[in-house]
Amino acid sequence: MTKLTDAGAVYNQHDAAFSHVSAYVVIDKRDGACVAKVAIKRSTSGLRTTAFVHWLGVPMVKGVANGGGYDKDSASVANAARRMLDLMGIEPRLTREALDDYDAFRAAASLDGGKRWDDAVRDAGFSVFQAV
């Protein structure tokens, strides 16, 4: 097997492993730091989507959306974001600015009214990049 063939096999394995998965990083535009990660897993039937939302430094949350005919990626992210903790008064390690960022992300990602989740988060002042 040649190196080119090996590389082709690796790409095929990657495509098979992640065919129903998308992963994103959320970047704070002020300082370029990664502040959150979002992973979305779709069932092979397409009827169930699960989102894992992790604002770095606080517990990860999971949300789901079922059925068909609508944007289940955004619905599952919104379902997860609504489970994010209200950190006001319980997270003394975060600065006021960091709490404001967290709240802005949580509010934007929680929206479920027709706008894609990543567009809502961008509108809240973050950059969103798809990693997988």
Image (cartoon, rainbow, N blue to C red):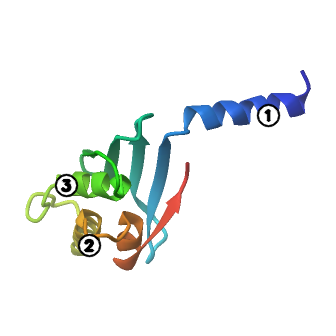
Q: Quadrant of residue 4?
A: top right
Q: Disc 3 to disc 1, how far (Cα)?
A: 40 Å
Cβ atoms under marks 3 and 1 closer than 8 Å = no
Q: Which residue is mark 3?
A: 84
Q: Residue at x 41, y 71 (%)?
A: 119
Q: Earlier in the sequence, mark 3 or mark 2?
A: 3
Q: Disc 2 to disc 1, how far (Cα)?
A: 42 Å
Q: Earlier in the sequence, mark 3 or mark 1?
A: 1
Number of residue marks = 3
Image disc number at residue 104:
2
Callout 1 crowding tier (Cα within 10 Å): few <14, some 14–19, many ≥20: few
Q: Is residue 101 above or below residue 3?
A: below
Q: Secondary structure at mark 1?
A: helix
x, y (%) of residue 54?
32, 50
Quadrant placement of the N terminus: top right
Q: Secondary structure at mark 3?
A: loop
31 and 5: which is toward the camera: 5
The single residue placed furthest to the left in the displayed view is 89
71 and 92: which is toward the camera: 71
Q: Amino acid at mark 2?
A: Ala
Q: Is residue 45 left or right of residue 96?
A: right
Callout 3 crowding tier (Cα within 10 Å): few <14, some 14–19, many ≥20: many
The single residue placed furthest to the right in the displayed view is 2
Q: Residue at x 41, y 74 (%)?
A: 122
Q: Residue at x 76, y 29 (%)?
A: 9
x, y (%) of residue 82?
18, 57
Q: Disc 3 to disc 2, how far (Cα)?
A: 12 Å
Cβ atoms under marks 3 and 2 closer than 8 Å = no
Q: Amino acid at mark 3?
A: Met
Q: Which residue is mark 1?
A: 8
